[in-house]
């Protein structure tokens, strides 16, 4: 029996969902989510392992229920993202409900860069499309995907709604490019940071355990004077006039948290640690409240990592003075 190539399926979905009615794409993604969930493969098991940190008292049945809803939310993101470039500005506005946007708006109004510490939650691309218009032009980093056609499709989608994309390539100095971007002044830099993609991350307390996350948001804020804002995204049901204006039953809530100040009187490494822990604390509280919005199918908790490989990583951290 011939096995379908996931990359070809993804490219087909991009092309199909770009013109198909959203009710069709959402329905197909629900079916895909349920079929994936029923197989209970490595990704679903990893999702349940991660969700157990947010619901430590949950039994197997409860975790299975959460993972099923989580997969539906996860694949809903893809159905929405593929169709994002064809939305009108009015539809995007109707689909996004910002909470606490005053602080980033004030900073951007003063010509200051704003860094958003984000996680893989809700539809962060929809949030970015809205924020690029209403807060400041957005520049973000995207992990290089294989095959290149998939990465290129995601870049085109994000650029079509006003975001600038910096590819995360092996050996590239993305941080330096982000610093140059922030130094331009009024710019928004949303960074997905709930997983360390560079092996230069930081170990923090997260949902009652130790986990490894990216240091980019805190380090960039310290280096450039950018305002660091913990930000969470979740789906919500739409009703009435807003639903009619959005053209869909689903929108997102974008919660901008209290800006994280740069600590004084401590070394730079401690500043990074304290600021990273602050936005991770805000993220953890949100995940506990809305666990099915966190689409994390990879390892982030130290207890789940390969011990020998992580020992090497910790030794490098110690040599750099970043181990905690």
Image (cartoon, rainbow, N blue to C red):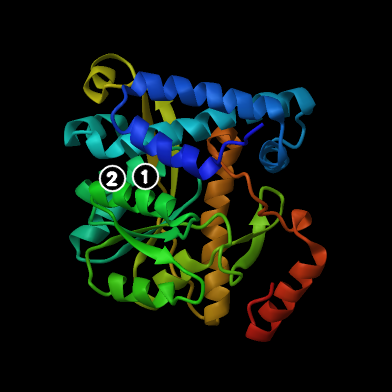
Q: Which residue position holds label 2?
A: 129
Looking at the image, which residue sits at the far top?
240
| Res. 76 in view | yes
Q: Nearer the viewer, residue 211 or 265?
A: 211
Residue at figure coordinates x 46%, y 37% from the top left? 122
Picture coordinates of residue 244 (x, y %)?
24, 17
Residue at figure coordinates x 40%, y 69% from the top left? 221
Secondary structure at badge 1 equals: helix
Q: Count residues near mark 1 (Cα–Cα under 10 Å), then give few for <14, some for 14-19, many for 20+.
A: some
Q: Is residue 184 left or right of residue 149?
A: left
Q: Nearer the viewer, residue 178 or 53?
A: 178
Q: Is residue 151 left or right of residue 68?
A: left
Picture coordinates of residue 69 (x, y %)?
58, 26
Q: Nearer the viewer, residue 126 or 224?
A: 126
> On residue 125, which mark appears?
1
Q: CA–CA distance between discs 2 and 1?
A: 6 Å
> On residue 94, which mark appears?
none
Figure quadrant of the N terminus: top right
Say whether marks 2 and 1 touch (CB < 8 Å).
yes
Picture coordinates of residue 280 (x, y %)?
56, 55
């Amino acid at each position: 029996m011939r096995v379908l190539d996931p990359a070809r399926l993804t490219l087909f979905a991009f092309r199909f969902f770009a013109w198909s009615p959203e009710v069709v794409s959402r329905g197909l993604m629900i079916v895909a989510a349920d079929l994936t969930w029923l197989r209970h493969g490595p990704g679903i098991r990893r999702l349940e392992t991660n969700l157990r940190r947010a619901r430590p008292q949950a039994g197997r049945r409860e975790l299975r229920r959460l993972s099923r809803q989580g997969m539906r939310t996860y694949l809903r993101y893809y159905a929405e993202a593929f169709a994002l470039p064809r939305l009108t500005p009015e539809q995007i506005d109707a689909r996004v409900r910002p909470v606490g946007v005053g602080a980033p708006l004030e900073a951007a109004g003063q010509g200051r860069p704003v860094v958003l510490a984000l996680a893989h939650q809700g539809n962060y691309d929809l949030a970015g499309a809205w924020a690029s218009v209403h807060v400041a032009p957005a520049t973000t980093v995207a992990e290089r995907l294989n095959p290149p056609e998939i990465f290129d499709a995601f870049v085109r989608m994000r650029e079509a709604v006003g975001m600038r994309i910096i590819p995360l390539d092996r050996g590239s100095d993305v941080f330096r490019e982000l610093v140059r971007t922030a130094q331009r002044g009024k710019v928004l830099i949303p960074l997905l940071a709930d997983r360390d993609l560079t092996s230069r991350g930081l170990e923090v307390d997260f949902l009652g355990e130790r986990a490894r996350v990216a240091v980019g948001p805190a380090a960039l804020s310290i280096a450039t004077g950018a305002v660091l804002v913990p930000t969470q995204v979740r789906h919500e049901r739409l009703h009435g006039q807003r639903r009619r204006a959005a053209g869909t039953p689903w929108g997102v809530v974008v919660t901008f948290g209290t800006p994280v100040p740069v600590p004084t009187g401590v070394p730079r490494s401690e500043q990074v640690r304290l600021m990273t822990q602050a936005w991770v604390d805000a993220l953890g509280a949100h995940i506990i409240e809305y666990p099915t919005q966190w689409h994390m199918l990879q390892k982030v908790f130290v207890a789940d990592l390969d011990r020998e490989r992580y020992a090497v990583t910790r030794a490098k951290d110690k040599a750099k003075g970043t181990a905690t």
